[in-house]
Structures are given as structure tokens and as C-alpha cells.
Amino acid sequence: MSKTLSESESKSLLSAYGVPFLPEELVTASSKASSLAQRWGGPLALKLCGANIAHKSERGLVRLGVEGPEAVQQACQDLLDAARPEDEATGVLIAPMATGLREFIAGISVDPVFGPTVVFGLGGVLAEAIADVTVRLAPLRLYDAFDMLSSLRSQSLFGSFRGEGEVDRDALANLLLALSRASMEIDGVVSIDLNPVMIVDGRPVALDALVELDRSVVSQ
Amino acid sequence: MITPAHFTALFDPRAVVVAGASTHPGKFGFVALHNILTCGYSGDVYATNRERAEVLGLQTLADLTELPDGAVDLVFVCTPASTNPELLRQAAAKGIKAAFIASAGYGESGDEGKQLQEELVELANELNILIVGPNGQGLVSTPSQLCAQIVAPYPPAGRIGIASQSGNFVSSFMNLSRQSGVGVSRAISVGNAAQVGVIDMLEFYADDPETAVGLVYLEGVANGREFANRLEAVCKRMPVVIVKGGASGSGAKAAASHTGSLATDDRVFDGMCRQVGAARAASIAEAFDIAAAFATLPRPAGPRLAIVTTVGGWGVLAADATASSSLELVDLPDDLRTTLDGLLPPRWSRNNPIDLAGGETKDTVPAVLDAVVGHPEIDATLVLGMGIQSNQGRLEREGPFYPDHGLERIVAFHDRQDSRYVDVALAASEASVKPVLIASELAIADPSNAAVAAVRAADRYCFPSAERAVRALHFMNEREQWLDSLTNESAQQI
């Protein structure tokens, strides 16, 4: 049996290994959301956070580009009200809106024959159809991380792209190395999803994280 | 405990016995003995047959107990599964260290067979005998001129070591060896791989002075992590080329994660190969190309490729193939361009691909090849268009006007020119210790062509197309990059 960690638990666990995330806060009251909106300014992203929330987008539990203290407070309250008991909701995650045209997917998957693997591929809505994906066994060497980047067919995405600058390949390789370390050091990792990893100002940022652990190992 | 001495007994036995030799020419027990007796093996050959029938002029023994003590190293087993435990005991008592078990009726045939197979391995371990198979097609070892197998053919001697989970692909690789002249050192079909498998063979090959490259057909591995670690250790010592069957099977993972669904079996295997430094080929033909390149060419010092072609077309496609590889189609260095200006008519391409534009005279091609191959900013050279003169010569020789009208003389001249060009190219390769690859479809279309024959005579491989040559060189270059990364990372750790 496995259990999934909430988005905020997943992120705090992985950021310790060097996976880059946006600055964000977990709030439990909508008044807190309003003051965050004043402090940060600009459009924000709000997501209901809990250990057991599937189909976040389909259920309308993600609000993007919300701007201004009042609108943010209202959106936060709406999300808190929408929580169901089985969601095991712990609050609302609030972060500045990140924008970028290029999305990747990265993660850890345990192969039945070869054990933990690091997965890296093109993200976005067409990702599965395009299937530009590469896999290596964990742990990665530095060479392997860069070789993963070179192995994607969509090489043009790493250069300047539609007005966005070049991707910082070192930062992307470091993200893969961070995932590799996490898979080696965290007990009972069944899977890790970073989806999407967005390129913001040339650097990769994981906008969502999901860590799945083997319950029997975790409970020990 | 299986030791290198067991593998020496398997591949270079002092004497061999075929257990279960048959008088029926359709049976494995006949074919195996026939092939051992036919291909030049110089050790003593024995055979057993329950009725002591004479087979192929050889007086057989009733069983292994009649063998001389301590004289025989290898038994080739064609007897029924049920009789094999007793046979192994008799073999051990006679000092036999290795058994190739061709018999079927084991793990491939249901639960009872699996049980028999496990018992056989236990017994072999207890007797300290190496067993290969069961259900395998045999082995070839050219240093001992040993052809202990039940599939054709027997390949020329060379430096490729073959290990396969399918006997039929051993046969395919050896047919390509015979066709091209690029030879084989050892070849073995591991059958059900009960006691030892492909990776054990590769470990032996890595330390085998007769073998320069491992060529593998694989369908599956049981303990992936251990396999990867052992394969990496082999790849540090010897290049390995792998064709993986079952690559299209999707990896339906139990994990609910998105990345899990993307990490298909094939992608995992592919990534593993890149990490451990193995060249994964897409087909049997490509695998043989790469293995032949490793077996016969000097190592490339870098990715800078020059393409020399006698006329257009060929060079264009070769350049296209380079674009999707790890190789670099270098801009011609100024001094080299100047040198070539002095050798070629003004219409030559003046860039890479170096298109001689049909402007070659008797001595231009050798001079151009020497200048290009030897240039310090060029790591490897691909030569296209060899053999076209003698291709015309063939048409003339086979036509109704030959040998009159001066045809005899000109045909001989064409042949000499082509073999001379090849000799010069390969001599430049030897002198500079750089890869020079010669590619022409004549390798397949007309192996008797003078250029193709000259490549073969020099113990090199004539690649069947420019694209295939580029692809093979690409894998050689990738191996160098992988080896460099190991050196660099260990240097950083110090």
C-alpha cells in the first residue's frame, strides 16, 4: 500500500534536496490570503492542498491569475468551503503566478526490474501524444543528467524560444540530480511527479509536486 | 564456484565429447558432431551412443565412463533431460569442467521442466561444472576452430564475441560475419541461461585477448540492477553492442503517477544502456555494423568527420546522416583547402563533403586521402565512391566485346585503381591511427568488386551505406565521450 503526501508536504520534502519551487504559503484562513495579496502584489495562484485530493483542476480547486486583496480573499474562502472531509485538506497554497511557455515533466518511477529511475520529458497538454521522454537509473551522475537533456528530441526548446531566453541547462540538470538524491535518501519512495516544471526567466521551477511513499516503510 | 578456468574449458577445450551422438543426420546429436569434425578442431573428439554405433566414421563410447581420465574439458549434451543428472556426475568424475546442454525439456516447457532445470543447476554447482543452456544451440570458438553447435554457419576468425539469448540470432550475426569477412572470436547461445547468462559471457570476453567487442542479443534480464552494474564494469574494459528484443512492449507500471506511465520498459532499458556505456542498436544489421566498426577501426579521438566522395549525391546523404549524430561535419581548415586546391580541378566542392567532382586522375585520390586523413583537425574520414570504376569494369568484362577492343587492359586497370585507392585509404588510417570508413552498397551487391575485396583483404569492414557507416562511427564517438566522462568525474572527485 502506498500513500501520497499533500502538495505542500511534497514540496517541503523535495526542496530540502534542492528541487526549485516558487515561494508560496499555506494559509488556513482567507484573511491571511488577503494580506499575502497586499504583500506580494500581482496575480496569484491558489490551490486547495490536502493529502488526498485527486482531480484538482477538474473540481475547480485551482484558481489562477487572481489579483487584488478582495478577490484573493474570496477565492481562498471559496476553496476552503469546497473542501470535502475525504480531501484531508490542510489549507490553501498561495503563490505568485508563474508564466512561461515551456513546460517539462520530471519525476521518479520505480521499475520492477531496474528499481528507481529518473524520468524527464516534454510537458504540457500534448506531452503524452508527443512522448518525448528519457529515463535513467537512479542515482544519476552529472554526465547522465546532461545526457538526459541532450536525449530529448525537442532540443530547440532549450534555446531561445518565442521571446523567452535560453534555458539554464545547469539548473535543469541540477533539478534532475536533486530528484535522484531524493529517490536514494527518502525511505520508501514509490513515485515522485513534478508536473509541470515550468521554465520561468530561463530557470526551471516545479509548480506542482506529488510524492508517493510505501506505507509499510513510512510507518516504521 | 565458476571461475575463468571453466570458461577456458568451454571455449578452448583440450578435447570434446558429444553425448548422445546420433547416426540420423537430422538429429542434433549428429549435426553437433558433424560440425565439430568439419571445422578444423584439433583436439581429440569423442562421442557417446547407447548402441556404440559408428557415427561419421567415429567409434562411439557407450557412455562417459569410458572416456580417458582428465583428458576432456567439454561435453556437448544432446541426450534427453531425464538422463542428464547421471551424465553430469559421470562427466565430473572424468574431470570435465564445462557442459553445453542443447537438450530441451527444461524451463521452457512448463513447471516440471523448471523443476528439472533447478535441480540441474544445483547438481552442477555441487559438481563444480559450468553448464550453459539448457535448450541452447551451441557455441563457436575460432581460436580453437571449434564449431560445437547445431546452427550454421562457421564464421571466419576475428575479434567479435557474440552472446545471445536466441540461437537464431547467433546464426544471423555469423552470417553477416561470413558475408563481410569481419570475423568472430567466440559465439554462444545461452539458451535458458539456467546457471550462467549473457552477462557472464561478456565478463569472460572482456578479459579474453581474442575478443575486442561484445555483440549481444537480449530479450530480458532478471535482476536489472545487478545486470546494469556488471555491464558497466564490462563496458569500461570493452565496447558492447546490444540489440534488445521485445522493445515495443509497453511498461504498464503499477504506480499511479504520471511519470510512471512514461517510464516504459524500453525507455528504462535505453537509458540504462546509455548510463553504462553500452551501444544499443536498433536492428541486427546495425548491431553488426557497430561491432564491426569497433572490431576493425582505430578509436576516434574526437567527433570531427571529413567525407570524401568521388562524385556528388553520396556525400549529400552522408552529410544529412551526420546532422542527426554526435559527429561534427567540420569546416575544412584553410591549409587543407589550399592543399586540395593544388590537387583538384577548380570545380571541386571546396568544402566538406569533399566532392572530387570526378576530377580525379591516377594520383589525385591517393594524395587527397593522405592529406585529409592525416590532417590534425580531422578525427575520422568517410570515403565514398570506391568501386565504381571496377563496377564499370565488370559490365565490360561480362559483355560480348571482352577482351577485345582494349577492354582487357582497361578492366584490369579499373580493378587495380579501386584496390589501390582502398589500400591508400586504409594505409592512411593505419599510419595516422584514425578511423577511415569505406562505404558502398557494392559490399552487398557485388562482394567480388575490387574495392570491396580490397577492404576485406585488409581485415576491414566495407559498410553497406554511408548512413550506416556514420551511424557506427557515431556509436564509437559516444563511447569515447562516455569514457571521458568517467575520467573527468573521477578527476573531479580527487
Image (cartoon, helix red, strand yellow):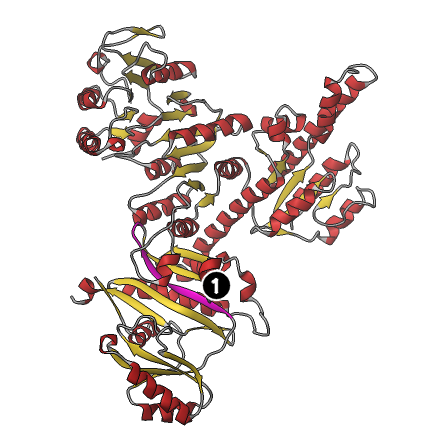
Residue type marked 1: Leu
Q: Could you tell me which residue is drawn at 34 percent across and 48 percent down?
A: B229
Residue span colored magenta: A102-113
Q: Position of residue B205 (x, y in %)?
A: 39, 35
Q: Residues within 10 Å of mark 1 (few under 14, many from 20)?
A: few
Q: Quadrant of the N terminus of chain B?
A: top left
Depicted B58 relative to depicted B478: above or below: above
Residue that mark 1 sits on: A126
Total numbered badges shown on the rendered structure: 1
**Residue B329 shown left or right of residue B126 in the figure:** right
Q: Position of residue A93 (x, y in %)?
A: 34, 81
Depicted A167 relative to depicted B403: above or below: below
Q: Nearer the viewer, residue B60 or B53?
A: B53
Please tell me in which quadrant of the rendered image residue B7 appears. Answer: top left
- Local secondary structure at mark 1: loop
Q: Position of residue B242 (x, y in %)?
A: 43, 41
**Secondary structure, magenta segment, majority class:** strand
Q: Could you tell me which residue is drawn at 49 percent across and 27 percent down?
A: B175
**Residue A74 shown left or right of residue B321 in the figure:** left
Q: Is residue B274 visible?
A: yes
Q: Is residue B491 visible?
A: no
Please tell me in which quadrant of the rendered image residue B204 appears. Answer: top left
**Residue B110 shown left or right of residue B216 in the figure:** left
Label 1 marks which chain's residue? A
The verdict on residue B398 being magenta is no
Q: Nearer the viewer, residue A206 or B440?
A: A206
Q: Could you tell me which residue is drawn at 23 percent across and 33 percent down?
A: B110
Depicted B388 relative to depicted A34: above or below: above
Q: Position of residue B438 (x, y in %)?
A: 63, 36
